[in-house]
Image (spheres, rainbow, N blue to C red):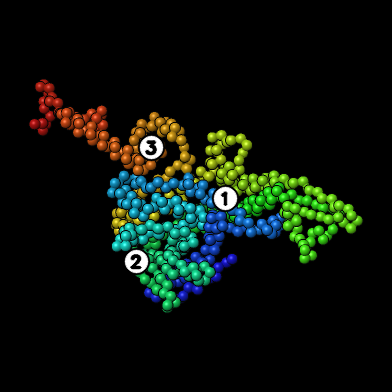
């Protein structure tokens, strides 16, 4: 059921006319898209209704709740393998890294990343807003918040490949208009953020707060599979995914009906009178009541003959099971999932090579999403946050060295990681203690920092011990002994001293 449109008042006190036109356009866009976004969320949550063809499912079972969780599987399988561990800067600036770590910690971003990626796969994109916080209310100085497409939208500038305006719906009165009336909005235009609230007693909207900054429109889009004509991407819960989910739900319900017939097989009666199938009021007994009944009593006919009663052979459930396997295979092909993850068990267990091959397509999709879309978007988000925190062009220049640090989707074993690292270090020994190599070995950023700190302490301890012993440090102490300064060698007596020699 489609929702009723929102009649946004044209009067917004304190909002300039050009910003008002942008606001109306964005609210209209948000309202038009929200129905489909809600529908996809229902599929993700398993709350989509049964789409019955009206042929083989009896009325008594049409209200039976059948849940197929495949759409959530398609989204979650990708999210679990898309792991943003943090950021590193190629210049190795400790000050910049400390600032980035503070933004991540104060905004709890490591836990937000997974939720943001889940919403992006559900709806096609998610919006990241960077804005100044209110420390007096306990907020961070710079806030990074993610809003899914049910609560935000934006205006795309194809020339600059960025958002020229954006809208975040902060609160809704769900009791009005079916869709709900927005009661608090945040409108982002270049250099300004307008906080707009609805005033119930006046029936109008008014600007309650204005924030100015030098970060343009501090909004980034994190799309999934964006196209030139569709910059906000497409949902992983595609029309094909929704159709196959509906088909699987119908097949599951037919299987339930077939299971009922196993316990209540069809029977027949030859030579029975019609009144045998009527109730005490002379009304026909429903056929499903006769079929599902446990006791059937029949009397002799008018000639005194006893009716012949029999039972049809029980139907096989294999056609339904085979159809469900076909549904699962089609779903796996659409979403790059291994069919075994959908509950289809093969007779023979798969080998390690077969398991890897089954996940390769999904892995390639994840690598492309991380490198071409998510990585650059997250880097721009962090650059905006650093710029807003420092309010300095020099900070933006330094922030351009930030690179997103991704975990491996393949979850390799420790043995395979160690063997691969040994081969690289053997070829290039200088890689042994670099941060890049330690990441490839599977160590997390916090573990790498702790290891490097331990190494520095050990080296410092060796240096102090050697100095206390009255000798220069050596490589055995964890430090390379400094080379003593060269002493000029006096020339032989038979040769004249060089000019200027003292």
Say the numbered circle drawn on residue 422. Answer: none
Circle 1 SS class: helix
Res 426 quadrant in image: top left
Circle 3 SS class: helix
Say the numbered circle drawn on residue 211. Answer: 2
Q: Is residue 400 above or below residue 454?
A: below
Q: Is residue 49 left or right of residue 189?
A: right
- Mark 2 and mark 3 lie on one chain; the one further toward the N terminus is 2
Circle 2 SS class: strand
Res 435 quadrant in image: top left
Res 342 quadrant in image: top right
Residue 394: percent from the left, percent from the top?
29, 54
Q: Is residue 195 above or below residue 240?
A: below
Say if residue 231 shows up in the picture: no
CA distance for labels 2 and 3: 44 Å
Quadrant the N terminus occupies: bottom right
Say the numbered circle drawn on residue 70. Answer: 1
Say the numbered circle drawn on residue 437. Answer: 3
């Amino acid at each position: 059921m489609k929702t009723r449109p929102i009649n946004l008042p044209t009067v917004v006190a304190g909002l300039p006319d050009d910003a008002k036109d942008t606001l109306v356009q964005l609210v209209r866009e948000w309202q038009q898209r929200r129905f489909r976004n809600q529908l996809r969320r229902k599929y993700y949550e398993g709350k989509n209704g049964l789409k019955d063809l009206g042929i083989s499912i009896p009325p008594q079972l049409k209200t039976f709740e059948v849940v197929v969780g495949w759409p959530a599987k398609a989204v979650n399988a990708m999210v679990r393998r898309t792991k943003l561990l943090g950021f590193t800067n190629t210049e190795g600036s400790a000050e910049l890294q400390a600032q980035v770590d503070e933004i991540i910690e104060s905004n709890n971003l490591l836990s937000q990343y997974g939720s943001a990626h889940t919403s992006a796969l559900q709806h096609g994109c998610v919006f990241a807003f960077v804005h100044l916080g209110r420390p007096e209310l306990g907020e961070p100085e710079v806030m990074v918040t993610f809003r899914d497409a049910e609560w935000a939208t934006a205006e795309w500038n194809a020339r600059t490949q960025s958002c020229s305006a954006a809208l975040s719906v902060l609160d809704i009165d769900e009791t009005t208009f079916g869709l709900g009336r927005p009661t608090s909005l945040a409108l982002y235009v270049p250099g300004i953020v307008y906080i707009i609230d609805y005033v119930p007693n006046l029936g109008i909207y008014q600007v309650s707060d204005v924030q100015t900054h030098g970060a343009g429109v501090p909004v980034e889009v994190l799309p999934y599979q964006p196209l030139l004509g569709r910059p906000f991407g497409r949902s992983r819960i595609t029309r094909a995914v929704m159709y196959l989910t509906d088909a699987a739900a119908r097949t599951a319900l037919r299987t339930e009906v077939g299971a009922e017939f196993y316990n209540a097989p069809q029977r027949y009666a030859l030579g029975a009178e019609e009144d045998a199938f009527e109730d005490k009021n002379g009304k026909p007994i429903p056929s499903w009541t006769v079929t599902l009944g446990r006791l059937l009593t029949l009397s002799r006919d008018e000639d005194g003959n006893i009716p012949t009663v029999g039972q049809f052979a029980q139907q096989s459930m294999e056609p339904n099971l085979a159809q469900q396997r076909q549904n699962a295979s089609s779903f796996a092909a659409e979403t790059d999932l291994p069919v075994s993850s959908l509950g289809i068990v093969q007779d023979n267990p798969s080998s390690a090579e077969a398991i890897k091959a089954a996940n390769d397509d999904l892995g390639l999709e994840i690598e492309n999403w991380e490198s071409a879309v998510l990585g650059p978007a997250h880097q721009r988000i962090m650059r905006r946050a650093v710029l807003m925190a420092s309010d300095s062009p020099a900070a933006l220049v330094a922030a351009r060295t930030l690179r997103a640090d991704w975990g491996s989707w393949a979850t390799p074993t420790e043995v395979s990681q160690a063997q691969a690292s040994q081969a690289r270090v053997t070829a290039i020994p200088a890689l042994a203690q670099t941060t890049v190599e330690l990441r490839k070995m599977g160590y997390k950023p916090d573990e790498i920092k702790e290891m490097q700190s331990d190494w520095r302490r050990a080296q410092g301890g060796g240096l102090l011990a050697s100095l206390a012993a009255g000798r220069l440090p050596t490589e055995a102490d964890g430090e390379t002994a400094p080379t003593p300064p060269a002493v000029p060698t006096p020339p032989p007596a038979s040769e004249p001293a060089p000019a200027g020699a003292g």
